Image: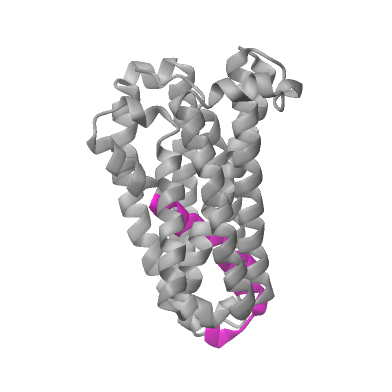
Amino acid sequence: MSEAARSWFQFARAFDYLGTTLLIGGMAFLAFLWPDGAESGRSRRLIGFGWMCGFAGTVAGLCLNAAWVAGRPPSAALDPSVLVPLFDSPFGRVWFARALLWLLALVVVADLTRRGARAARSLPWRVGAGAVSLGLLRTNGMTGHVLDLPGWSQAVVFAHLLVVCLWVGGLLVLLLAVLPARDRDVLAAVLPRYSRLAVGSVAVLTAMGALLAWQLVGSLDALLHTGYGRLLLAKLVLFAVLLVLGFASKTWVDRRLRVAATTRTLALSVAAEAVLAVAVLGVAAFLVTTSPGR
C-alpha cells in the first residue's frame, strides 16, 4: 500500500471530521440554543465553511483511499482504474453514500442562508437538518474500526460522535460567532444554555469513549506499547487539558458573566479549548487508519 496516499487520506479525514463537527454542531446550536444567530453572517459562513470542509474531505478521502488500497501514489487518486474497484467494497459504497449526503446537506445549508432565523425555528428545516446529520454520523461510524466490534458498539460510537459534534461544533460557533458580537443580552441567554449542554456532552463522551477504548485496545500493555495505543494516549491527554479549560470557562460563566466588565478572559479560554478540540479531531483522523492495539 502507498504510505504517501495513506498520509493524504488521513488529512482528508481530518477535514471531513472538522466539517462534520462544524455542520452538525453549528446547526444544532442555531436550532436549539440561538435561533436568532441564523441572521448572523458569521454563523452562516461558519456552517458553510463546515459544509465545504466536509464535502471536500469526503470526496478527497474516497479518491485517496482508492489509491492507498491499490498501492498507488496520490497522483493516481482520480484514475478510473483505481477508483472503480473501490465501489465493489463496503467501504467504497458507504463513502460514496456519504458524499451524496453532503450534497443533500447543501440544500439544508442553502435554506438556512436564504431564510435565516425563520429556517432555524421551523420544524421542516429542523427535521431536514436532523435527517442529514443522522446520516452523516451513521456513515462516519461505518468507516472505522467499530465495524469489527459487537453490535452494541454501533450505538456507542453513534452517541460518541453526536456529543462530539454538539460540544465541539457548539464551541466553535461560540468562539467565532457569539463572542465576537459582544452582545451582553445574547451572551446572558446563550452561554448558560451551552454550558449545560457541554457538561452533559462531556459526561456522555467520557463514558462512551472509555467503552470504545477498552473494546479497541483491550489491555494496558497494548495501550502503552502499540502505535494505536500511543495515539489514543495523546488524544486522552489533549482531552484532559480540554476538560480543565472547559471547567474554567464554566466557572467564569457561572460566577462572572453578569458582573464582568469584559469577556476577554472567557474568549481566551474558549479559544484555547477550540484549538485543543481541533487537535483532538486531527488525532482521531489518524486513529481510524491505524490498526487497533487489540
Q: Residue at x 49, y 50 (%)?
A: 242
Residue 184: quadrant of the picture: bottom right
> Does residue 243 appear to the left or right of 1 in the view shown?
left
Residue 180, percent across and down? 67, 73
- Give the residues in magenta: 162-187
Q: Is residue 58 above or below residue 168?
A: above
Numbered label tally: 0
Q: Residue at x 65, y 61 (%)?
A: 48
Q: Is residue 276 visible?
A: no
Viewer-side residue, 3 vs 172: 3
> Does residue 102 appear to the left or right of 149 in the view shown?
right
Task: Report the quarter where the C terminus lies.
Answer: top left
Q: Residue at x 45, y 33 (%)?
A: 143
Say if the magenta span includes residue 167.
Answer: yes
Q: Is residue 266 visible?
A: yes
What secondary structure do most residues of the magenta stretch adopt?
Answer: helix
Task: Report the quarter where the N terminus lies.
Answer: top right
Q: Residue at x 58, y 71 (%)?
A: 111
Residue 229, percent across and down? 43, 23
Seen as rendered, the residue at the extreme right is 75
